[in-house]
């Protein structure tokens, strides 16, 4: 498609509601890398990640009428669709992921040096700027889809500390963007 | 709580991630309506997560795009450039103008009809998807109900069998209101238990049924928590039946201090 067009979120929403091929091209070309990135980060299996990307696009395409701009930005809405599908898949697929995660945290605690967080991806460098504790909390909440309560239990810290840690991490990350 | 405090607390980050308990999520939903500064912060947090997502973007394989496009329903685009069409008509001789105009009308008519039917088609497809989902739910319910009715039929067969003797087990001091009924076939030894009126127990405990045979307790098996009516182990020459509360999985000997109900034949 022609590159001259750059839609604002409002324009894209309107265009998506017509369900035109043009809207799909724009949507896919501009958003699929970020959506695929988050899926592959959570899932770590290419075939499953392909299926999930497809599922995410079907959900976005068929669900655009139920998207509520007052609740979240379009981008965040789409990311959350991809994220939730992936997390559901992980949770349904194997309870192993929980165990692996505990192992990950243990390893991370033992070895305070930089262990792979999100391998081979640009994010890694970024997130490595964070304290170990802040990395863990982003990993659990963002990539593993833990709730506040689950994260508190997993790390054995009070609920309020979950909040303040994620806050610190996000304020720090903001400086990079 | 002050908006500032909420912002500083980190609750909004968890809100955006969907990690807050339902109650707190609702509170923030409400507060957002009256506190624009919360909305601004939420947008900032969303943008940060979006940047995080962009920073980890991975290009999917190119052939995936068409595969995905094939799974989607597209609307038909009405892409008729009327200016071009009329400029062509102007160049024509008057004789053809009328014919051309008529042709354009027919084309526009056809395209709109196609558009109309295609959107009806899309709509109908969506309805089919919905109906299929509804049908699955119903099928699930039917399956559940027929399972239940099967269980009730079996119970009825046991209860109404004249060879079965109903023995009421009455609550002992530990639980005076507890009750249970054993249906016992003295000839075949077949034993069924209705345990619907036993008090609820914790996760680490389970009831166990015993028969008293020649003055000694005989294990007839533990009682499955979710089953209210069940076939137990067979027993002959029983004098009495009793139920005790035991650790999960039961015990070889009854805990007599935890005997809930007892009834003699």
Image (cartoon, coloured by chain):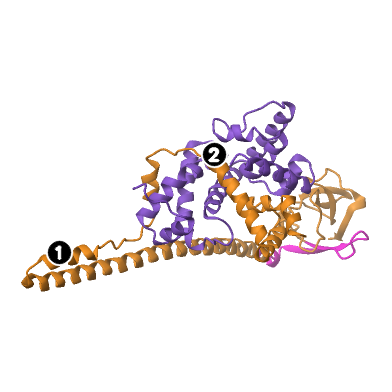
Chain colours: A purple, B orange
Was residue B175 drawn as part of the magenta stretch in this picture?
Answer: yes
At horizontal 36% and vertical 46% (from top left) the residue drawn is: B66
**Span shown in magenta:** B157-181
Horizontal and vertical percent position of residue A62: 45, 58
Between disc 1 and disc 2, the foreground one is: 1
Horizontal and vertical percent position of residue B57: 51, 39
Vertical arrangement, residue A102 with respect to residue B248, above or below: above
Residue labelled with disc 1: B88
At horizontal 73% and vertical 62% (from top left) the residue drawn is: B164
Mark 2 burial class by Cα count in 10 Å: few <14, some 14-19, many 20+ = many
Was residue A139 drawn as part of the magenta stretch in this picture?
Answer: no
Quarter of the figure that contains the N terminus of chain B: bottom right
Vertical arrangement, residue B241 with respect to residue A45, above or below: below
Horizontal and vertical percent position of residue B121: 34, 65
Q: Horizontal placement of B165 versus B98: left or right? A: right
At horizontal 11% and vertical 74% (from top left) the residue drawn is: B98
Horizontal and vertical percent position of residue B244: 85, 53
In contact (CB < 8 Å): disc 1 and disc 2: no
Sequence-first disc among 1 and 2? 2
Q: Chain of mark 1?
A: B
Mark 1 burial class by Cα count in 10 Å: few <14, some 14-19, many 20+ = few
Tag 2, which secondary structure? Answer: helix
Real-space Cα separation, disc 1 to disc 2, in angstroms: 51 Å
Residue B55 circle label:
2
């Amino acid at each position: 498609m022609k590159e001259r067009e750059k839609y604002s979120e409002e324009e894209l929403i309107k265009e998506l509601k017509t369900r035109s091929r043009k809207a799909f091209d724009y949507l896919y070309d501009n958003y699929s890398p970020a959506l695929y990135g988050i899926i592959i980060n959570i899932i770590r299996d290419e075939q499953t990640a392909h299926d999930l990307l497809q599922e995410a696009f079907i959900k976005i395409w068929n669900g655009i009428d139920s998207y509520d701009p007052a609740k979240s930005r379009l981008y965040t809405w789409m990311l959350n669709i991809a994220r939730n599908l992936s997390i559901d898949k992980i949770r349904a697929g194997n309870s192993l992921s929980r165990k692996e995660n505990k192992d990950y945290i243990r390893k991370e605690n033992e070895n305070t040096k930089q262990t792979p967080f999100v391998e081979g991806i640009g994010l890694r460098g970024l997130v490595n700027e964070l304290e170990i504790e802040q990395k863990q909390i982003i990993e659990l909440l963002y990539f593993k889809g833990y709730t506040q309560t689950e994260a508190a239990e997993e790390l054995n810290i009070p609920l309020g500390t979950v909040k303040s840690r994620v806050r610190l991490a996000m304020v720090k990350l903001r400086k990079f963007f | 709580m002050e908006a500032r405090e909420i912002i500083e607390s980190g609750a909004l980050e968890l809100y955006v991630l969907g990690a807050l308990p339902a109650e707190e999520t609702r509170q923030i939903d409400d507060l957002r309506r009256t506190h624009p500064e919360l909305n601004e912060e939420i947008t900032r947090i969303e943008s940060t997560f979006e940047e995080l997502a962009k920073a980890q973007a991975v290009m999917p394989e190119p052939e995936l795009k068409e595969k995905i496009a094939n799974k989607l329903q597209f609307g038909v685009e009405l892409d008729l450039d009327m200016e071009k069409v009329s400029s062509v008509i102007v160049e024509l001789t008057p004789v053809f103008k009328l014919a051309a105009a008529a042709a354009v009308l027919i084309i526009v008519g056809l395209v709109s009809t196609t558009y109309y039917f295609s959107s009806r088609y899309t709509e109908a497809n969506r309805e089919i998807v919905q109906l299929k989902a509804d049908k699955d739910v119903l099928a699930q319910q039917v399956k559940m109900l027929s399972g239940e009715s099967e269980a009730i039929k079996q119970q009825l067969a046991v209860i109404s069998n004249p060879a079965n003797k109903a023995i009421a087990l009455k609550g002992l001091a530990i639980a005076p209101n507890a009750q249970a009924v054993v249906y016992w076939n003295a000839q075949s030894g077949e034993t069924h238990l209705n345990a619907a009126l036993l008090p609820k127990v914790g996760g680490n405990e389970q009831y166990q049924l015993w028969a008293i045979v020649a003055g000694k307790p005989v294990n007839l098996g533990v009682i499955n928590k979710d089953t209210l009516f069940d076939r137990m182990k067979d027993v002959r020459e029983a004098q009495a039946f009793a139920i005790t509360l035991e650790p999960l999985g039961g015990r070889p000997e009854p805990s007599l201090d935890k005997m809930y109900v007892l009834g003699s034949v």
